[in-house]
Image (spheres, grey):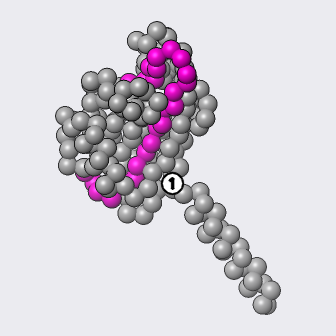
Amino acid sequence: MKMALSFAALAVASLLSASHAAGFALSSPTVTDGATLPDIHVHGRCGHPGGNLSPELSWSGVPAGTQSFAVTLYDPDAPHEGGWWHWLVFDIPASAGGLPQGAGNGAGLPVGAIESPTDFGTPGYGGACPPPGNAHHYVFTVYALRVAKLGLDASADHDTVNAAIVRNTLDKATLTATYER
């Protein structure tokens, strides 16, 4: 009997450990962590034919207390003031489990979600567009937020949006792809 209880306790501990280890995760059917960003997600105006279409993203292992999400795409390798914001969308309802392909191009954002201007100067998704040379890293991040709304509108600049996201983050998950031309 004692041995059976020990095995049961061990099994429960293993399940809890595996569940905790899985944590908050971001995935995409077209963007693979560490791989090259597919052309469909590359900006078309950068000397390379690209679709400039935001990828389908989904998340799992959402932390308790999540009231909304934010999604960003950032290139830390861009020579523009330490990086380049390609996409900022926030106030995504807590009921959302992801975003469909093209959501950053005006097709399928959840009701209430807001996109703010990127370093391209407009709101919405702007795909990879590095200068010729070394590969750049494109970091897709989903943030689980402790507030339902950031209290910002679509005119908020990326620094303001990013600061509000960081202040209200419960957890985050990332996918990083590379692209060079």
Q: Specify start and end residues of the magenta stretch as a single range.
A: 124-149
The image shows residue 80, relative to residue 19, as above or below, that is: above
Left or right side of 117 for 138: right
Inspect this view and state whether residue 51 appears. no
Give neighbour class at mark 1: few <14, some 14-19, many 20+ (Cα, 10 Å): some
Q: Looking at the rendering, which quadrant does residue 31 occupy? A: top right
Image quarter (top left, top right, bottom left or bottom right) of the C terminus: top right
Q: Which residue is mark 1?
A: 24
Q: Is residue 131 magenta?
A: yes
Viewer-nearest residue: 53 or 85: 85
Q: x, y (%) of residue 101?
A: 45, 30
Q: Residue at x 39, y 41 (%)?
A: 71
Left or right side of 10 for 67: left
Q: x, y (%) of residue 142?
A: 43, 45
The disc labelled 1 sits on which kind of residue?
Phe
Q: Residue at x 66, y 74 (%)?
A: 12
The image shows residue 1, relative to residue 57, as above or below, that is: below
The image shows residue 134, relative to residue 108, as above or below, that is: above
Image quarter (top left, top right, bottom left or bottom right) of the N terminus: bottom right
Magenta region, mostly helix, strand or loop? loop
